[in-house]
Protein backbone atom coordinates (compact mmCIF):
# COMPACT_ATOMS: atom_id res chain seq x y z
CA UNK A 1 0.00 0.00 0.00
CA UNK A 2 1.18 3.53 -0.78
CA UNK A 3 0.93 6.05 2.04
CA UNK A 4 -0.10 9.67 1.45
CA UNK A 5 -0.52 12.77 3.54
CA UNK A 6 -3.51 14.75 2.28
CA UNK A 7 -3.51 17.80 4.58
CA UNK A 8 -0.44 19.68 5.80
CA UNK A 9 0.86 23.20 6.23
CA UNK A 10 4.15 25.00 5.67
CA UNK A 11 5.65 28.05 7.34
CA UNK A 12 6.06 29.77 3.97
CA UNK A 13 2.31 30.34 3.64
CA UNK A 14 0.49 29.34 6.84
CA UNK A 15 0.71 31.73 9.79
CA UNK A 16 0.30 28.86 12.26
CA UNK A 17 2.96 26.53 10.77
CA UNK A 18 6.55 26.30 11.97
CA UNK A 19 8.32 24.03 9.45
CA UNK A 20 9.26 24.86 5.87
CA UNK A 21 8.03 22.90 2.88
CA UNK A 22 11.46 21.28 2.54
CA UNK A 23 11.50 20.23 6.21
CA UNK A 24 8.00 18.77 5.92
CA UNK A 25 9.04 16.81 2.81
CA UNK A 26 12.05 15.36 4.64
CA UNK A 27 9.95 14.40 7.65
CA UNK A 28 7.33 12.58 5.57
CA UNK A 29 9.96 10.81 3.48
CA UNK A 30 11.67 9.59 6.65
CA UNK A 31 8.28 8.40 7.98
CA UNK A 32 7.77 6.18 4.92
CA UNK A 33 5.27 8.19 2.91
CA UNK A 34 5.04 7.87 -0.87
CA UNK A 35 3.69 11.38 -1.26
CA UNK A 36 2.21 14.46 0.35
CA UNK A 37 -0.27 17.14 -0.65
CA UNK A 38 0.59 20.62 0.61
CA UNK A 39 -2.61 22.40 1.62
CA UNK A 40 -1.68 25.77 3.07
CA UNK A 41 -4.33 28.13 4.45
CA UNK A 42 -5.55 30.32 1.63
CA UNK A 43 -5.81 34.11 2.06
CA UNK A 44 -9.12 33.71 3.89
CA UNK A 45 -7.50 31.47 6.49
CA UNK A 46 -4.45 31.82 8.72
CA UNK A 47 -2.23 33.05 5.91
CA UNK A 48 1.24 34.49 6.37
CA UNK A 49 1.10 36.19 2.97
CA UNK A 50 0.74 40.01 3.23
CA UNK A 51 -2.70 41.19 2.14
CA UNK A 52 -1.63 44.47 0.59
CA UNK A 53 0.35 43.02 -2.32
CA UNK A 54 -0.92 42.62 -5.89
CA UNK A 55 -2.77 39.32 -6.46
CA UNK A 56 0.01 37.78 -8.57
CA UNK A 57 2.61 38.39 -5.87
CA UNK A 58 0.32 37.00 -3.20
CA UNK A 59 -0.23 33.83 -5.20
CA UNK A 60 3.53 33.51 -5.84
CA UNK A 61 4.23 33.72 -2.10
CA UNK A 62 1.33 31.39 -1.31
CA UNK A 63 2.82 28.67 -3.54
CA UNK A 64 6.33 28.84 -2.05
CA UNK A 65 5.72 26.21 0.62
CA UNK A 66 4.51 23.75 -2.01
CA UNK A 67 7.34 24.65 -4.38
CA UNK A 68 10.02 24.19 -1.74
CA UNK A 69 8.48 20.87 -0.68
CA UNK A 70 8.32 19.77 -4.32
CA UNK A 71 11.98 20.66 -4.98
CA UNK A 72 13.03 18.70 -1.90
CA UNK A 73 10.69 15.84 -2.81
CA UNK A 74 12.22 15.57 -6.30
CA UNK A 75 15.63 15.33 -4.67
CA UNK A 76 14.79 12.66 -2.07
CA UNK A 77 12.10 10.65 -3.89
CA UNK A 78 8.82 11.88 -2.40
CA UNK A 79 5.85 12.81 -4.58
CA UNK A 80 4.61 16.31 -3.71
CA UNK A 81 1.27 17.62 -4.96
CA UNK A 82 -0.55 20.94 -4.64
CA UNK A 83 -3.80 21.76 -2.91
CA UNK A 84 -5.12 24.54 -0.71
CA UNK A 85 -7.35 25.01 2.31
CA UNK A 86 -10.03 27.60 1.67
CA UNK A 87 -11.39 29.23 4.82
CA UNK A 88 -14.80 30.62 5.61
CA UNK A 89 -14.98 31.81 9.20
CA UNK A 90 -14.71 28.62 11.24
CA UNK A 91 -15.11 26.29 8.26
CA UNK A 92 -12.34 24.96 6.04
CA UNK A 93 -12.46 23.30 2.66
CA UNK A 94 -9.63 21.30 1.09
CA UNK A 95 -9.40 21.97 -2.63
CA UNK A 96 -7.60 19.53 -4.96
CA UNK A 97 -7.06 19.55 -8.71
CA UNK A 98 -6.72 23.31 -9.19
CA UNK A 99 -3.22 24.73 -9.57
CA UNK A 100 -1.22 27.92 -9.24
CA UNK A 101 -2.27 29.07 -12.72
CA UNK A 102 -5.92 28.72 -11.75
CA UNK A 103 -5.31 30.88 -8.68
CA UNK A 104 -3.49 33.46 -10.80
CA UNK A 105 -6.37 33.53 -13.29
CA UNK A 106 -9.08 33.89 -10.64
CA UNK A 107 -8.36 37.00 -8.62
CA UNK A 108 -12.05 37.36 -7.69
CA UNK A 109 -12.53 34.20 -5.63
CA UNK A 110 -12.28 36.01 -2.29
CA UNK A 111 -15.29 38.09 -3.22
CA UNK A 112 -17.50 35.01 -3.65
CA UNK A 113 -19.89 33.74 -1.05
CA UNK A 114 -18.87 30.28 0.21
CA UNK A 115 -21.31 28.14 -1.77
CA UNK A 116 -20.68 30.19 -4.92
CA UNK A 117 -16.95 29.57 -4.52
CA UNK A 118 -17.47 25.84 -3.99
CA UNK A 119 -19.76 25.62 -7.01
CA UNK A 120 -17.36 27.62 -9.18
CA UNK A 121 -14.18 25.77 -8.12
CA UNK A 122 -15.87 22.42 -8.78
CA UNK A 123 -17.11 23.62 -12.18
CA UNK A 124 -13.45 24.34 -13.01
CA UNK A 125 -12.51 20.73 -12.22
CA UNK A 126 -11.67 21.01 -8.53
CA UNK A 127 -12.63 18.30 -6.05
CA UNK A 128 -13.42 19.60 -2.57
CA UNK A 129 -13.60 17.93 0.83
CA UNK A 130 -14.80 19.70 3.93
CA UNK A 131 -12.00 19.64 6.52
CA UNK A 132 -12.70 18.69 10.17
CA UNK A 133 -16.40 19.74 10.02
CA UNK A 134 -17.04 19.24 13.74
CA UNK A 135 -13.89 20.67 15.26
CA UNK A 136 -14.83 22.86 18.20
CA UNK A 137 -12.03 25.19 19.34
CA UNK A 138 -11.60 28.71 20.66
CA UNK A 139 -10.80 30.19 17.27
CA UNK A 140 -13.99 28.80 15.68
CA UNK A 141 -16.99 31.04 16.27
CA UNK A 142 -19.38 29.22 13.98
CA UNK A 143 -19.18 26.45 11.42
CA UNK A 144 -20.93 26.27 8.07
CA UNK A 145 -21.67 22.84 6.65
CA UNK A 146 -22.18 22.63 2.92
CA UNK A 147 -22.91 18.94 2.24
CA UNK A 148 -24.46 19.60 -1.18
CA UNK A 149 -21.47 21.60 -2.39
CA UNK A 150 -18.60 19.27 -1.53
CA UNK A 151 -17.35 15.93 -2.85
CA UNK A 152 -16.49 14.40 0.49
CA UNK A 153 -15.62 14.88 4.13
CA UNK A 154 -12.38 14.67 6.12
CA UNK A 155 -13.80 12.37 8.80
CA UNK A 156 -10.48 11.77 10.49
CA UNK A 157 -8.30 14.75 11.30
CA UNK A 158 -5.33 13.47 13.26
CA UNK A 159 -4.73 16.76 15.05
CA UNK A 160 -7.93 16.34 17.07
CA UNK A 161 -7.45 15.63 20.73
CA UNK A 162 -11.13 14.88 21.30
CA UNK A 163 -12.37 11.76 19.48
CA UNK A 164 -15.93 13.05 19.19
CA UNK A 165 -14.88 15.61 16.57
CA UNK A 166 -14.04 12.74 14.22
CA UNK A 167 -16.99 10.60 15.34
CA UNK A 168 -19.43 13.40 14.51
CA UNK A 169 -17.76 13.92 11.13
CA UNK A 170 -18.25 10.23 10.34
CA UNK A 171 -21.94 10.42 11.20
CA UNK A 172 -22.26 13.55 9.09
CA UNK A 173 -20.67 11.84 6.06
CA UNK A 174 -22.93 8.82 6.57
CA UNK A 175 -26.03 10.99 6.87
CA UNK A 176 -25.33 12.71 3.55
CA UNK A 177 -23.79 9.66 1.91
CA UNK A 178 -20.55 11.49 1.22
CA UNK A 179 -17.15 9.90 0.51
CA UNK A 180 -14.67 10.00 3.40
CA UNK A 181 -11.02 10.77 3.78
CA UNK A 182 -8.37 11.42 6.42
CA UNK A 183 -5.53 13.86 6.96
CA UNK A 184 -3.06 14.98 9.62
CA UNK A 185 -3.29 18.76 9.44
CA UNK A 186 0.39 18.84 10.40
CA UNK A 187 1.91 22.24 11.08
CA UNK A 188 5.46 21.28 12.01
CA UNK A 189 7.71 18.24 12.30
CA UNK A 190 7.64 17.80 16.08
CA UNK A 191 4.91 19.06 18.43
CA UNK A 192 2.27 19.35 15.75
CA UNK A 193 3.25 16.37 13.65
CA UNK A 194 0.59 13.69 13.16
CA UNK A 195 1.18 10.59 11.04
CA UNK A 196 -2.20 10.40 9.32
CA UNK A 197 -3.51 10.43 5.78
CA UNK A 198 -4.61 7.62 3.51
CA UNK A 199 -3.40 4.32 2.09
CA UNK A 200 -3.87 3.41 -1.54
CA UNK A 201 -3.18 0.29 -3.58
CA UNK A 202 -2.50 2.51 -6.55
CA UNK A 203 0.24 5.14 -6.81
CA UNK A 204 -1.20 8.63 -7.37
CA UNK A 205 0.10 10.85 -10.15
CA UNK A 206 -1.54 14.08 -8.95
CA UNK A 207 -3.70 15.62 -6.25
CA UNK A 208 -6.67 15.12 -8.56
CA UNK A 209 -5.82 11.44 -8.84
CA UNK A 210 -5.96 11.21 -5.02
CA UNK A 211 -9.25 13.12 -4.83
CA UNK A 212 -10.86 10.89 -7.47
CA UNK A 213 -9.77 7.83 -5.52
CA UNK A 214 -11.57 9.23 -2.46
CA UNK A 215 -14.72 9.88 -4.47
CA UNK A 216 -14.55 6.32 -5.83
CA UNK A 217 -14.02 4.86 -2.36
CA UNK A 218 -10.62 3.47 -3.33
CA UNK A 219 -8.60 4.65 -0.33
CA UNK A 220 -8.22 3.39 3.22
CA UNK A 221 -8.18 6.04 5.89
CA UNK A 222 -5.43 6.04 8.51
CA UNK A 223 -6.66 6.63 12.06
ZN1 LIG B 1 -3.32 26.20 10.62
ZN1 LIG C 1 -5.38 22.60 7.80
Image (cartoon, helix red, strand yellow):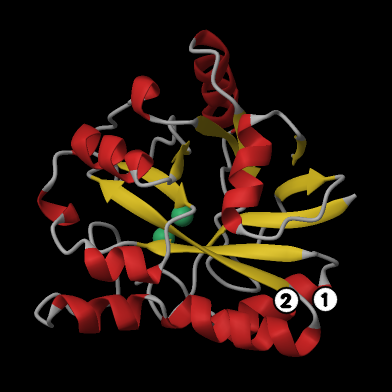
Seen in the picture, residue 98 relative to 52 is either above or below; the reply is: above
Quick one: label 2, few (<14), some, or many (20+) residues within 10 Å? some
- Please indicate, yes or no, whether residue 183 appears anywhere in the rendered image: no
Q: Is 171 positioned to the left or the right of 149 in the image?
A: right
148 or 170, which lies in front?
148
Check if mark 2's residue and mark 1's residue have beta carbons within 8 Å: yes
207 or 43, which lies in front?
207
Quick one: label 1, few (<14), some, or many (20+) residues within 10 Å? few
Question: What residue is drawn where x is 71% and y is 84%?
Answer: 74
Q: Is 148 positioned to the left or the right of 111 in the image?
A: right
Residue 119, given in percent of the width and then of the height, sits at 28, 35
Residue 120, given in percent of the width and then of the height, sits at 26, 41
Ligand 1 location (quadrant): bottom left
The answer to which quarter of the image holds residue 141 is top left
Question: What residue is drawn where x is 39% and y is 44%?
Answer: 93
155 or 128, which lies in front?
128
Please name the residue that numbered disc 1 is placed on. 30
Please name the residue that numbered disc 2 is placed on. 27
* Tag 2 secondary structure: helix
Seen in the picture, residue 93 relative to 206 is either above or below; the reply is: above
Residue 102, given in percent of the width and then of the height, sits at 33, 63
Give the CA distance from mark 2 to mark 1.
5 Å
Question: What residue is drawn where x is 14% and y is 39%?
Answer: 113
Q: How many marks?
A: 2
57 or 166, which lies in front?
57
Q: Is 28 positioned to the left or the right of 88 in the image?
A: right
Amino acid sequence: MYRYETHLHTAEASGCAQATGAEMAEKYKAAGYTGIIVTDHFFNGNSSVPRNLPWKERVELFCKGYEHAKAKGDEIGLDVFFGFEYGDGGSDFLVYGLDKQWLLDNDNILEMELTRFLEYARSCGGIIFQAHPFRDCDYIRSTTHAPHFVDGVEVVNMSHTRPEFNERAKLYAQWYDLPVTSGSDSHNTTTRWFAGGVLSEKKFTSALDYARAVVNGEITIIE
